[in-house]
Amino acid sequence: MNKDNILKKLEEYNINDINIIDYKEKDVLVVSFYYDFDDDVINAAKSYANDESEDEEEGDIWYEEFFIPYLNDYAIDEVGQYIEEIMEELDIEAQFVSYEIEKENYDYSEFLAVFFPKNKAITIEEVIENIEI
């Protein structure tokens, strides 16, 4: 498994602030990174929240039940697609988790991803338990 190829692919997808996290198994790549939302996505999330929410614009319900979930779903879909493509192209396995977007910092979403050889018995939960973040 070529870790440099994985990192290069992530960069090609405009994944930002890629941080390699040390892990005890050398054939496993653990990275954290950010997916930045462009203005079009943020505006689409605002439009969705305005259309679907009966709460005042930028009220608590507007944020918590419509705006933030839209952004979360969008980021997970995009990153999931990128990681699937990397898995297929490089013939590896991967798992990822996203962190909840905060109301005060909704212009990006943070992720943790684990890349490893096919048929390796490992879970992202196991990795998270064994790293310091």
Image: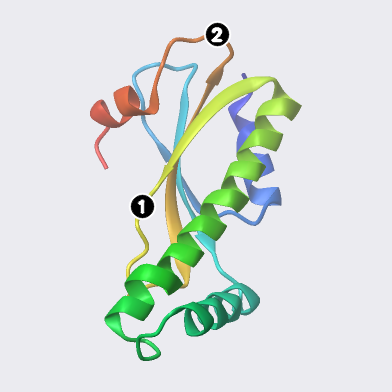
- Classify 10 Å Cα crowding around label 2: few (below 14), some (14-19), many (20 and above): few
Quarter occupied by residue 38: bottom right
Task: Please identify the quadrant where the C terminus is shown.
Answer: top left
Task: Give the percent coordinates (x, y) of residue 120.
Answer: 49, 10
Q: Look at the image and name its color scheme.
A: rainbow
Nearest the viewer among 121 and 19 is 121
Residue 27 drawn above or below residue 65: above
* Mark 1 element type: loop
Judge whether 92 appears above or below 67 on screen. above
Distance, label 1 to label 2, CA atoms, is 27 Å
Q: Secondary structure at mark 2?
A: loop
Which label number is shown at residue 119?
Answer: 2
Q: Which mark is residue 74?
A: none
- The answer to which quarter of the image holds residue 65 is bottom left
Residue at 62% from the left image edge and 52% from the top image edge: 78
Label 1 sits on what residue type?
Tyr
- Residue 79, given in percent of the width and then of the height, sits at 58, 48
Q: Is residue 9 left or right of residue 15?
A: right
Residue drawn where x is 35% and y is 86% of the image:
55
Residue 51 in view here: yes
Q: Is residue 54 above or below residue 129?
A: below
What label sits on residue 99 in the rendered view? Answer: 1
Is residue 104 at all visible to an observer of this figure?
no
Q: How many marks?
A: 2
Residue name at image x 62 percent, y 18 percent: 1
Q: Earlier in the sequence, mark 1 or mark 2?
A: 1
Residue ranking furthest to the right = 89
Horizontal side of residue 52 vs 12, given as left or right: left
- Kind of residue at disc 2: Asn
Residue name at image x 49 percent, y 31 percent: 95
Q: Position of residue 106 (x, y in %)?
A: 42, 72
